[in-house]
Amino acid sequence: MTGDFAAQDELQLLQDSARRVLADACPLKELSAGGADAVAIAARHWQLAKAMGWPGLMVPESAGGAGMGCRGLAILAEEMGAQFFCGPFLATAVVGPAIAALAGRRGRMTGLARAIAEGATVLAGAAVPAGGQWIAAAPELGVENDAAPRLSGTRELVEHPALATHFLALEIVRRGADRVGLLAAPVPAGTGVVSVPRQAFDVSCPIASIRFERAAVAPGDVLSVELSLDALTALLRPVHVAIAAELVGVAQSALDRAVAYAKERRQFGQPIGAFQAIKHRLADAFVLVANARLAVRQAARGDDEPASVEAARLLAAEAALKAAGDYIQVQGGMGISWESDAHLHLKRARRLAAAFGTSQGFRQALVDRFVASVLSPPVPPVHQGAGSA
């Protein structure tokens, strides 16, 4: 019990410190004014993250990290979403340690987790590649089998390329009925890597197309492994928790700002928040945000049930898109102007909702899981014998 209270105190401290420092660094005014240098903002935020030790949040203590797990990750990611943190946190601090842990058990990528925790390695990856899923469908990543492996291929929509020391290449190289082949490699930025900047939909997240032209990789940094679908789901669990939590933060920020505007904007001699239509809209958004937060916290508790993560992603995306849309509607004509920050909430929500999967995909997975549970034969009860202890 004492351990539970200590863990709660640690999580509360993380939330309070993150809320305080991120509120001071919130870039909404810069971004909504237009013309802001998103790369400069991301670099400033990443320096802040390193000073706070956030890159090592998911890295085990034995490798120099904090080892806080998904519960701490959910709290920090929610604050990052609410305060529009800009920086390669997902690829570096979430995807990177997950791949490093998998590779480390096979003697690969030694030192990657420690380099991430120390801030020496910054990873950039494609959260929404050309194939529309979490890995690129085409063109495929090719590895030349020689003493010094060389990779060729393309990654679209790579986030925060300017800050990266390495580009994380991920590919499902083969897929079976219940198993997949995973190829992963951190490709050093530099020779053999061509970056072409793209216009970002979400201006808080700079993107580029990355082309590997026989880029050299250390032999020990190439991971090629076969995983069961359950193992792949477990590998991506922290990624989905982080995305869902960040969506909840975006939703809460949009809701808070919509409520504040409804209290200040007056029409017909009273605040527009007094009108029933506005009240109902904001109340519905409040319920969705509260439900999504509960789902994310449940998914972050360490339960291995895949449905909890899928439900969290689905509910969080629904809450963020609803709250952002309502923020625009409550502001009326002002809501569709560039001067308002409402469009930043909607764009960030849409980007996150499409990262490492889609809402439709998670919804289908939940339906398939439910149908399978209904059609599966019931497990007969186990009866204790008379002589049982």
Image: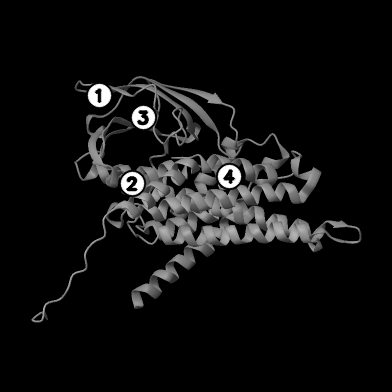
Using the numbered discs, state the Cα–Cα distance from disc 2 to disc 3 in whole angstroms: 27 Å
Residue placed at 23% from the left, 23% from the top? 148
Using the numbered discs, state the Cα–Cα distance from disc 4 to disc 2 in whole angstroms: 23 Å
Using the numbered discs, state the Cα–Cα distance from disc 2 to disc 1 in whole angstroms: 28 Å
Give the quarter of the figure containing the N terminus.
bottom left
- The residue under label 1 is 149
Q: Earlier in the sequence, mark 4 or mark 1?
A: 1
Label 4: few (<14), some or many (≥20) within 10 Å? Answer: many
Residue 290 placed where, x, y %? 56, 62
Q: Earlier in the sequence, mark 2 or mark 1?
A: 1
Q: In the image shown, does 224 or 214 lie closer to the viewer?
A: 224
Q: In terms of secondary structure, where does tag 1 sit?
A: loop
Q: Earlier in the sequence, mark 4 or mark 3?
A: 3
- The residue under label 2 is 233
Q: Disc 4 residue type?
A: Ala
Is the C-beta separation of discs 2 and 3 under 8 Å? no
Residue 275 placed where, x, y %? 81, 61
Q: Disc 1 residue type?
A: Pro
Using the numbered discs, state the Cα–Cα distance from disc 4 to disc 3 in whole angstroms: 30 Å
- The residue under label 3 is 188
Residue 51 visible to an observer of this rendering: no
Q: In terms of secondary structure, where does tag 4 sit?
A: helix
- The residue under label 4 is 349
Q: In the image shown, does 380 or 301 lie closer to the viewer?
A: 380
Is the C-beta separation of discs 4 and 1 under 8 Å? no
Left or right, 348 with reference to 334: left
Q: Disc 3 residue type?
A: Pro
Mark nearer the viewer, 2 or 1? 2
Residue 309 vs 16, above or below: the answer is: above
